[in-house]
Image: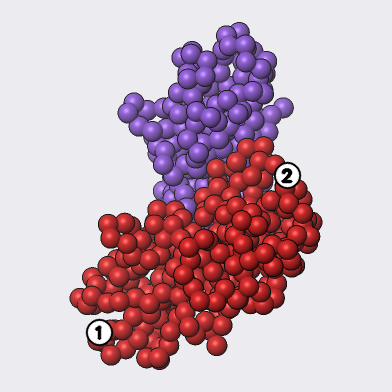
Chain colours: A red, B purple
Amino acid sequence: MKRIMLTIAYDGTAYFGWQKQEGMPTVEQRVMDAIGKLTGESVELIGASRTDAGVHALGNVAVFDTNATIPGERYTPALNSFLPEDIRVMDSKETEAEFHPRFDAHSKRYEYHIITGPVANPLETRYAHYVREKLDIEAMKRMAEDFVGEHDFTSFCAAGAQVKSKVRTVSLAEVTEQNGHIVIAVEGDGFLYNMIRIFAGTLLAAGLHRIDAGSMPDILSAKDRSFAGPTAPACGLKLCFIRYK
Amino acid sequence: MKRIMLTIAYDGTAYFGWQKQEGMPTVEQRVMDAIGKLTGESVELIGASRTDAGVHALGNVAVFDTNATIPGERYTPALNSFLPEDIRVMDSKETEAEFHPRFDAHSKRYEYHIITGPVANPLETRYAHYVREKLDIEAMKRMAEDFVGEHDFTSFCAAGAQVKSKVRTVSLAEVTEQNGHIVIAVEGDGFLYNMIRIFAGTLLAAGLHRIDAGSMPDILSAKDRSFAGPTAPACGLKLCFIRYK
């Protein structure tokens, strides 16, 4: 028995997220189907990040166990021949039997992209959230700084999420401008459900002067979802990479 | 009667090109339909560039004549409310009755985007042509230089195209690397059918060392389509803008 680790990129537009759901097109289901066609086995995938419907990924990670004798690196071209073009295995290798893509993750990087202007450029809106109004980027930068650190992120967690602790450590949260995009980059050891999209929606509210850029400490200490901004749309979010120990 | 000038951007993936064709989804048809819904008139559009199926545009230009009293700049938001999200009117204004978007064009800029690497990144392949092999970019740059100038571009025109003269003036043809893309930028007073895609395919052949980077003068002087490289796929091509006198 071998444990195979896949690094997977996808355009999430056409999918109901990563996690398999009966009767819905999901990335996990497509990858499982491709593995089934290749090995003849019905495998269970363990994914690192359950991205939401419409969210993109450059480097999500998943593992599965197989009795097939195919060398680890051969899964990349072999699975890609069975996958739709909007899902690609970028890398594959054999890994230790104990390796767990979520529990062993050291940190993850996400980016949230925003474009602004009088009209939404149709060559950008597939991978960026469009806002008509000009944003106060300095206010967004200032607010992002206070997101860094070990905090209880209850205010940035979708209501109803079932996790024991909502304490996470964010190691990087910054706002930059790149090729006409406003890019919110976030790195941390783990994220709560919708945490990055609520963070992006809160920074957007600051950029629109709907909330004060200095209010992040108050939002965090409230431990109440209603204190943060709205959840920003999925299309702007991208899981960039996952680092392992 | 007013003549209205529209600057139109579109993601060409879902369309059979600009020009209307019975029973096919085309950009021109969608824009005509939107104008019809807005003004109640059935108008003829005159477009600047008949982009092919799958080709994208940031700034194609079209005009139409109308008896509607709507101010020119109001067509932008009004038409966008009737258009699909992958087609956007970026700008609109009233123009002179004699203005012709093709004959009055001073120059056009196109870009052809290429990505390379072991696996095609699914977040890039909608707007860039993927090639597995590493390309010799210096060879592509060298060859592009010889495309500039006034030439008979018969070798870069799809067989069967019906135009009197195949002499055109290319004012810029350069290859650069931008954010991981190899970008072939071309500007000129006008282009023959498939000219940029054949040029891109020829540069690709040089980048792969299938043809000599010094062979552009011979290809041009042959005035024979078979001397140039293959027509590169539509997805990599984008009409950037059209300049007027």
> Is B72 in front, or is B113?
B72
Residue A201 shows in the view: no
Could you say which quadrant of the image residue B59 lies in? top right
User: Which residue is located at x 70 percent, y 72 percent?
Assistant: A148
User: Which residue is located at x 43 percent, y 27 percent?
Assistant: B29
Foreground tag (2 vs 1): 2
CA gap, disc 2 and disc 1? 55 Å
User: Which residue is located at x 49 percent, y 40 percent?
Assistant: B86
Query: Which label sits on residue A68?
Result: 1
- Quadrant (top left, top right, bottom left, bottom right) of the N terminus of chain A: bottom left
What's the amino acid at mark 2? Answer: Lys
> Is A226 in front, or is B60?
A226
What's the amino acid at mark 1? Answer: Ala
> Is B67 in front, or is A138?
A138
Residue A49 shows in the view: yes
Q: Position of residue B161 (x, y in %)?
A: 43, 33
Q: Are the residues tagged 2 and 1 within 8 Å (C-beta)?
A: no
Left or right of B145? Residue A44 is left
Marked residue chain, label 1: A
Q: Are marks 2 and 1 on the same chain?
A: yes
Query: Which label sits on residue A8?
Result: none
Query: Which label sits on residue A134?
Result: 2
- Quadrant (top left, top right, bottom left, bottom right) of the C terminus of chain A: bottom right
Work out which residue is located at the far left of the displayed protein and give it: A40
* Above or below A189: residue B162: above
Determine whether the residue tagged by mark 1 lies in a helix, strand or loop.
loop
